[in-house]
Image (cartoon, rainbow, N blue to C red):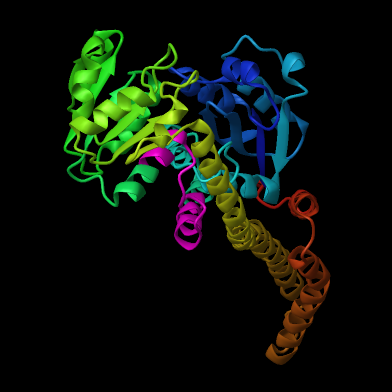
Amino acid sequence: MASELLIIGLNHHTAPVEVREKAALANGRLEAVLPRLLDAPSIHEAVVLSTCNRVELVACCEPGDEAIDALREGLLSSTDLTIEACREHLFELRGREAVRHVFRVASSLDSMVIGEPQILGQLKEQFGLSSDADAAGPILHRVFHKSFAVAKRVRTETDVAARSVSIASVAVNLAQRIFETLEGASVMLVGAGEIAEAAAQHLLGTGVARVMVANRTYEHAVELARKCDGTPVPFERMTNYLPLADLVVGSSGGGELLNAAAVTDLMRERRNKPVFFIDLAVPRNFDAEINSVDNAYLYDLDDLSAVVDDNLGVRKREAVAGEAIVEEEVDRFWQWLELLDVVPTIVALRDHAETVRADELGRTLARMPHLSDKDRDRVDQMTRAIVNKLLHEPTRSLKQDRPEREGLALISSVRELFGLGKKS
C-alpha cells in the first residue's frame, strides 16, 4: 500500500504557551514516544519535533483514520493532556502540505521570530534522535535532509536572518556603529540577569578589551563575570569604575541609577571621551537628560524597539523570497516522491501482466504443436499487443498529475485490485 506523509501537532499558531509547555516532550519523554508510535501497525516511520513553540509528529504512514488516531494518542501519551482538551489546538497536514511545513520550519519561516537560527539546530538534533531509534526510515530521511539543504539555500540566497531582532543584539550592533568598532573598548554591565547575559554573549567576539559587571547581588555579578571572562564590581562602588567604561548597559531593577549631573562629572574624569549608554531596564536606569550632556549618547528601549521593528520588517520582506524557494523545493521533492510510488507500481503491474501472458501463452502453444515457428511468433506478438493495449490506460492514469490524496488512493487501489506486492 502506498504511504502518506502526515503531521499531527500543535504550535504557537494554534495553542497558547500554557498548553505548549504541558505538551512539550523533554527529558527523555521524546524518546519514550517513539516506540509507542512504531508499535502502531499503520505508522511506518516517525520523527518527533518538540521545542518551546511546537510539539509535532511527522510520520510516514498508511492512509486513513487509524494512523491519525495513533499519532494523536502518541503525541499526548507522555503528558497529562487529553485529546479532548487539545482537540481545538491540534492541526494536521498531509502530503505536499506536510513537506512544505517541514521545509518552512527548518528555514525559520514558521518561527515566532522569522529568521532565528536556533530552530535548524533543534530540528537536526531531534531528527538525529529519531534516526538513532530507527524510527526515521528512507522517506523521512529524505524529507529532513532535504529540509536542511532548503534552509541553507534560504539563508544563502536571502537576507531573512541578516538583521538583528533581539534587543540585546541590536544594542551591541548600535554600539559598534557609534564607535565604528568595539575592539579595545571597555564595557560595564549594570545588572546580571538574562538581559545582561544576552548582551554579554553578543559582546563576546566584538573585540572588547574589558567587561565589568555590577549588580546589587555581588555573587550574581561574579557568576556573570566568570562567564564572559570579566571583572565583578561591587554595586556600591559602581560610580568609581564608570569612568573606565566606553559603553554602559543598564538592565538592573530598581529604577534610576544615573542622572545627567552624575554623567557630567563622569565626562570630566573621562576628559570628554565619548561614552555610550544603553538602557534596557524598565523602569529606566538612566535619566533621559543624559542625552543633553556633550559626548554622552543614550538609547533606551523605545529607540532600540524601533530598530528591532525595522529589522523585523526587512526579515518579513525577505521571507517572501524564502517562501518562493520553499515552493520550488517542495515541487522538486514531490516529483521525486510521486515517482517513488508510481514507477514501482507500473513496473509491478507490467511484470504481473507479463507473467500471466507468458504462462497462458506457454500452455496454449503446448497444446498446438503443429504451429510453425512463424505462427508461434505471430501468436506471441498478438498477446503482447493485447497486454500493451489493456495496460495503456491504467499506465497513463497512474502517471497523470492529480491531487496527492487522489494519487495515493489510485496507487493503493491498483495494487489492491491486481494483488501487487502480495505473496502468491
Range shown magenta = 146-172
215 to 317, vertically: above or below: above
- The residue sitting at the bottom extreme is 374
Compared across the picture, whether 152 is left or right of 315 comes to left
| Of 146 and 140, the residue lying toward us | 146
Q: Position of residue 117 (x, y in %)?
A: 44, 42
Compared across the picture, whether 182 is left or right of 325 comes to left
Name the residue located 63 percent from the left edge and 16 percent from the top edge: 18
Asked if residue 125 can be seen in this view, the reply is: no
Name the residue located 74 percent from the left edge and 51 percent from the top edge: 408
Compared across the picture, whether 68 is left or right of 125 comes to right
Asked if residue 181 can be seen in this view, the reply is: yes
257 in magenta: no
216 to 55, vertically: above or below: above
Picture quarter containing residue 397? bottom right
- Total labels: the figure holds 0
